[in-house]
Amino acid sequence: MSASSAEQKPSAAALVTLFGSSTALIGLAIYQWFELIKIRQGGTSACSVNETVNCATVWNSTFAHLVHEYLGMPVAGLGVLWGVVAFALTFLLVQRPSNFRAGVKSWAIVGLLACVTFISASLQAKALCLTCLGTYALTALYAFGALKLLGGELIPGVKELLGGLGWGLVLSVPVFLGLLYPGSLTPTEVAALPKNLDVRDPNDVNTIIDSLPEREKLLVSWARDTWKKAPTHDTSMFPVHARRGNPEAPVKLVEFTDILCGHCAKFEGTLNEIDAMAPKGNLSIEPRYYPLDEECNPEVKGSAKDGVRCYGAKIQICAQQHPKFFVMRREFFENQHQLDQGMMLAIAQRLGMDTAAIQSCIKSPETEARLKEDIAYAKLFDIKGTPLVLINGREAPPAPVFLLGMAMSGGNADAPFFQRLPPPPTPQQMGQ
């Protein structure tokens, strides 16, 4: 009898693998959750290297939004749930090996199947999430410990698997219910402007700041503090080539975008709202280009080899003097998901532009030099991704209410309505 019990006891290698991988996965999932919050507040994730290697693209995909909408928590929350249950099953395995061996194996298989689903979603988003790769690796390591190191049948019979899965589901219920609260506090979209706001009345800005949730107030306070502390650089060597609005506006905003950047498309819509709301003459907008493709931008790694990002930057450079340039730019972003070179040229033609001249301009060395100028300009500010937003020569977080306040105040970050904000948050409060 003792020999049989000894055979059933998990090996030290199996337990170290199971406990270690599940604990590490819980920690990684919590980190991903905090990074998602930072992105949704207008910040940039540490794993957003470029448009291809970009966790934010995956976390903001349609699939990820559907998960959050229907389950009440982001995908990272499911990672926490799976990791906690995996750890709990391993703990129970130590107490009663014969009862929970099938449970650990079943839960490992569930994790592998979930990884296949999430990998498929990442492929559809056409982006690589580095931290997600870490999640897949840790899940695979747990599965190796469960299916190989734990002993017994590699994959138990259907009856044992279903019984083991039942334990996993029972343990999942309280964990899931406990995660619904932080899930409800996690923003589902990137921060946007409040609706139904007549910002031409400064009292309305006071009202909207007072009515913001505490976390949103902290975000605006953080953005204001970040901008005030940001260094300035001499940009006099970069002349203005295109500008919308008053050239003498007290708030001069420069934006560096990539035509296929999802955050850039959302920011462009927000910026159009701010421009419409701001008092006339207070804001000017200068578009610049930072294509996330090594074929035309040596500062980034990776390329889709389709030329869309580079072509998108160059056709905008060539069309900047046309009166319908900003209409064209807006249509490019609105049609981002199906955009290709032919569509961009067709949009330009429909808006009355000379496409033959544009095509010649795109191939010219002058346009190549202009694009290099924008890339050099962005490098001054140690660009980490797009959009990069500058206000009066300082980098500014693309937080909508902060940008709106700056446009309303004529660039005065100490305007009375900003004084209604709480002190800048600590890194812990920002979820960093």
Image (spheres, rainbow, N blue to C red):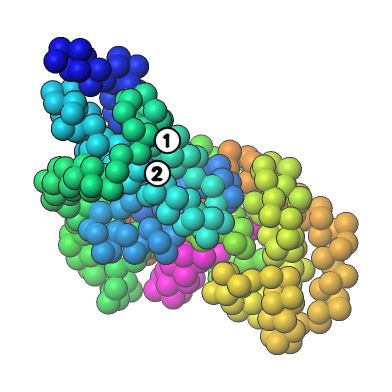
* Quarter containing the C terminus: top left
Q: Amino acid at mark 1?
A: Ala
Q: Quadrant of residue 210?
A: bottom left
Q: Is residue 22 left or right of residue 268?
A: left
Q: Is residue 218 left or right of residue 401?
A: left
Q: Quadrant of residue 316?
A: bottom right
Q: Amino acid at mark 2?
A: Leu
The image's mark for residue 309 is none
* Quarter containing the N terminus: top left
| 228 w.r.t. 273: above or below | above
Q: Earlier in the sequence, mark 1 or mark 2?
A: 2
Decide whether residue 258 is among the magenta residues: no
Q: For numbered disc 2, what is the local secondary structure?
A: helix
Work out which residue is located at the far front of the displayed protein and give it. Answer: 1
| 54 w.r.t. 405: above or below | above
User: Which residues are the magenta region?
Assistant: 264-289
Q: For numbered disc 1, what is the local secondary structure?
A: helix
Q: Residue 405, how many percent across, how many down?
A: 35, 60
Decide whether residue 273 is among the magenta residues: yes
Q: Is residue 44 visible?
A: no
How much space separates mark 1 and mark 2, taking CA atoms?
A: 7 Å
| 148 w.r.t. 220: above or below | above
Q: Which residue in the protein does label 1 denote?
A: 140
Q: Which residue in the protein does label 2 denote?
A: 112
Whether residues under marks 1 and 2 lie with C-beta atoms below 8 angstroms apart, the answer is yes
